[in-house]
Amino acid sequence: MTHAGAHDGTLVALSILIATLASFTALDLASRIQASSGWAQRAWLATAAVAMGGGIWSMHFVAMLAFSLPGVEVTYDLPLTLFSLALPIVVTAFGFTVANRRGATPVTLALSGLVMGLGIAGMHYSGMTAMRLPADLRYESLWVAISVLIAIGAATVALWLAFRSTVLSIRISAAIAMGLAISGMHYASMQGAIFTPHAPVDGGHGVASVGQMHLALWVTATTFLILALALVAAMFDRHFATLATREAEALRASEERFRLLVQSVTDYAIFMLDREGRVVNWNAGARRFKGYEAEEIVGQHFSRFYTEEDQSDEVPKRALETAEREGKFEAEGWRVRKDGSRFWASVVVDPIRDDAGQVIGFAKVTRDITERKRSQEALEQAREALAQAQKMEALGQLTGGVAHDFNNLLMAVLGSLDLLKKRIPADPRTARLLENAIQGARRGAALTQRMLAFARRQELKPTAVSLPDLVRGMSDLLQRSIGPSVEIETRFPLKLPSALVDANQLELALLNLCVNARDAMPDGGRITISAWVEEQGASGEQSYVCLSVADTGAGMDDETLARALEPFFTTKGVGKGTGLGLPMVQGLAEQSNGHFVLKSRKGAGTTAEVWLPVAQKVAQIERAAQAAEPLREQLTRKLTVLVVDDDPLVRENTAAMLDDLGHEVIEARSGEEALGLVHQARRIDLVLTDHVMPGMTGGALASRLAEERPDLPIILASGYAELSGESGSALRLSKPFDQRALVDAISVVLAHSDEGGTVVPLRPRVG
């Protein structure tokens, strides 16, 4: 007699629940398979296979425990039961592996679903075979086919949904459908199972026994625990993956912002190098500085940015070695652009290390500081120029002071020699010695004039000078001075305005320039003296006459030209030059409200240009000097002269010259003492005072006397050109002066006193 058996409703419900939960767990774990890689992906694939395959087996086993034949005891073969457990796990793992591969096609998905479905059906029928009961078992073919088709369909759908469904509601619905389908496969197969008991069936035992119920509950609880642990693990992994994803996104966003920042920087070239020094990336600043596009330079060695000299010296290699050894390399130097031009760069190279501390590359930052270097060089040049100007000023003050003191000494020497010449008996040999001494003193006076010209303290007598006439007048002197091996050529326009300058000093300056030109042409050559007029200034308001002296000599290099105007600098050798010639010419030009220009190039000769203002009218100096000329012969009356000087040598020498002229002399050592004597003396006809004195200067004394005794003639003696405005209308007499210059000064000041004329400065006649 055949029997279909009976099922326990509770266990049937548990089996369906197990199938549903196993399906949901498998779908959930499939998302972790997709989100991971490597060993983690393989671990999640194995977990999903155990959850799906083991869950299907648990559903099958609980469903088998739900089946019973009345009065028939059912047992199970352990090896076959374990085989039925392993089979769905293996085929599920195979199916998930194939479905998770990239490029899986519908055909491969269908084939893997077929294998997985057949494996699940095999699990069911091997489990049925593991049943041990006193009855024969056979199956109806239709139900077998239906169960197999359900298994294949459910497996294929499960594989398709496993890697596509991410929405929770869809996943739950799919899990319920798959659970019902898998359960349906089992119960469809059981519907086709026909049992033929070996003995009569007891209808009173149509439900599962207590032992079966306990076993089913234990299997169900174990399955639920395993599935729950898998879900919890997936939940934590998903949480950590979400955190990791957020961190990765934040890192990517930060990297993108950093990339945009680096790419946006145009004032710095920022790029990376690999371990060997090849360029890895490139930013806009690097493109602007160096001229290379990223595709041109990435992969190339960074040494191409260095000059050939630096490459030969292995500077790039040492830079990377220093950065790796010391943690940073920093330097400045010339770098080369794509077009071959150079720029001055500030370079910083830092090593890039991995977590283990190994150098994996270098970060290089370059900045174009060419303009800053030029500014620093200009600042250094300005500082040097300032230091030179300060040195020149200090030297000028020293030179002026020395010249002043030397003038005082020459005053005593020249005055004493003049007086001695008058008083000694007529002896040719003695006269010759005296004349030599006088000439030496006068040459010393000429030297002080040069020193004062350099110091811009020389007293000048500017007049309207015709440059062509001046050059023609001293042509014989020039030719004798430079010798026959040098030819002199003059070039003057037909009409050339006169220059306002001291004629004697200009002659001396011209002679100086011609001698310098001769010394630059030891094998002979040509000196060209020319002149022209030119308007200068923003609106051409000032006209200048330029006196030019050009030679065909060897010329000067830039270094020598830069120092040519320094005082005491000479290239003529020891004892052949004082080094004051050109500074004296420059001092004369600037003191005459002009300027001096020196041009030269090695191998192309030298040109010296003296620029002087155009004389608008004949100086008043000449008229005053001419007006005083007739009075020199008429100066016969005896005068009472107050001589004021703090230097006893000068004071005594001046008094001696006046006494020799027949005048009465009163001496004072200071301005204060002179004021007292003026107040006490019954008669003083003339005051002759030095200017530079401690306490009250000669100018201050002249100003006080002009207020108290406006009719008292005053002569102010000084070697300086620039006197303060305190001197008032006092006549100025240049030091050193001899007795003849003193007579001239007295004649002029008395003429002014008698006629109310203009007082002018007088210079001594030297030579």
Image (cartoon, rainbow, N blue to C red):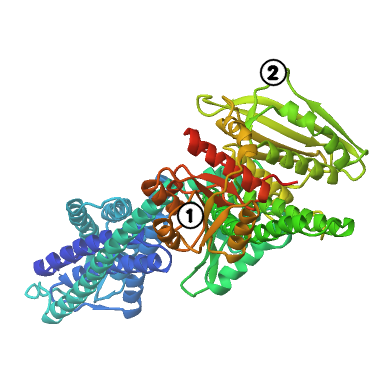
Q: Amino acid at mark 1?
A: Gly
**567 above or below 621?**
below
- Please state the horizontal and vertical placement of residue 185, each as a whole percent of the image: 24, 57
Q: Is residue 369 among the parts visible in the rendering?
A: no
> What residue is pinned by disc 2?
495
Q: Residue furthest top?
A: 494
For discs 2 and 1, the disc positioned in front in the rendered view: 1
Tag 2–tag 1 contact (CB < 8 Å): no
**424 above or below 636?**
below
Badge 1 marks a residue whose secondary structure is: helix
Which is more toward the observer, 450 or 223?
A: 450
**464 above or below 32?**
above
Left or right: residue 603 versus residue 408 is right
- Please state the horizontal and vertical placement of residue 380, each as a whole percent of the image: 56, 55
- Please state the horizontal and vertical placement of residue 97, each as a whole percent of the image: 41, 59
Q: Earlier in the sequence, mark 2 or mark 1?
A: 2
**Image-quadrant location for residue 171:** bottom left
Which is more toward the observer, 118 or 6?
A: 118
Q: Amino acid at mark 2?
A: Lys
Mark 1 is surrounded, within 10 Å at the Cα level, by few (under 14), some (14 to 19) or many (20 or more) other residues, namely many
> What residue is pinned by disc 1?
698
Mark 2 is surrounded, within 10 Å at the Cα level, by few (under 14), some (14 to 19) or many (20 or more) other residues, namely few
Which is more toward the observer, 638 or 214?
A: 638
Name the residue located 54 percent from the left edge and 49 percent from the top edge.
639
